[in-house]
Image: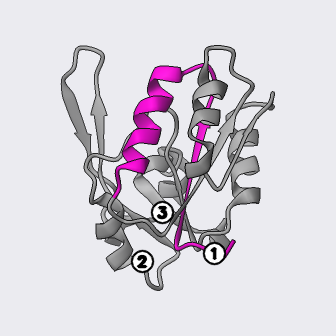
Amino acid sequence: MKNKDITIITINYNNLLGLKKTMQSVFDQTYKDVEYVIIDGGSTDGSKEYILDNAEKLAYWVSEPDNGIYNAMNKGIAKATGEYLLFLNSGDFLCDNYVLSKFSLELKDADIYYGNLIKVRQNGSFLKSKGPDAEKITILTFITVVIKSSFFFYKKKFI
């Protein structure tokens, strides 16, 4: 498979409803030069079967026990061939069908691109989290904010 511009990595463990929402938001994107990788931690809630039903839309998937979230993320990185990586965890979703098209116009030379994150609370209300100001990014940003990985497109060579 030729390298794609963007690899989206979704990690999941026993979150079938969240996984469905996440996968559908990726499948609905107008931008199609995307490689989609799913790392499932050996779910027993039907997630594996749902992934299997959609396997033809995925570049790679696996459902097996792992050693936690960071181990799963590293498995995804190892399989990714895209120039930029986006971690879109199970339950997260892209807010409209044009997010990747918009970002693809910006993905040129920077090692990291970022955007805003909208959190949906359990009561259905929204909380918008703004990404850090470009002028204020420091090493502390990476310690305190980068963990919220859905903000960021990372250049693979950076990771």
Disc tally is 3
Q: Residues within 10 Å of mark 1 (few under 14, many from 20)?
A: few
Q: In this rendering, which labeled residue sits more in front, label 2 or label 1?
A: 1
Q: How far is the residue under mark 2 from the one under mark 1?
A: 15 Å
The residue under the point 28% across, 22% down is 121
Measured in 3D between alpha carbons, the distance from the residue under mark 3 to the one under mark 1, in whole angstroms, is 16 Å
Marks 3 and 2, the one that precedes in the sequence: 2
Residue 13 painted magenta: yes
Q: Nearer the viewer, residue 81 or 48?
A: 48
Q: Which residue is mark 2?
A: 107
Local crowd at mark 2 within 10 Å, few (<14), some, or many (≥20)?
A: some
> Residue 124: image x %, image y %?
21, 20
> What amino acid is at disc 3?
Phe
Residue that numbered label 3 is attached to: 153
Mark 3 in CB contact with mark 2 (< 8 angstroms): yes
Tell me, for residue 3, which label it has, or none.
Answer: 1
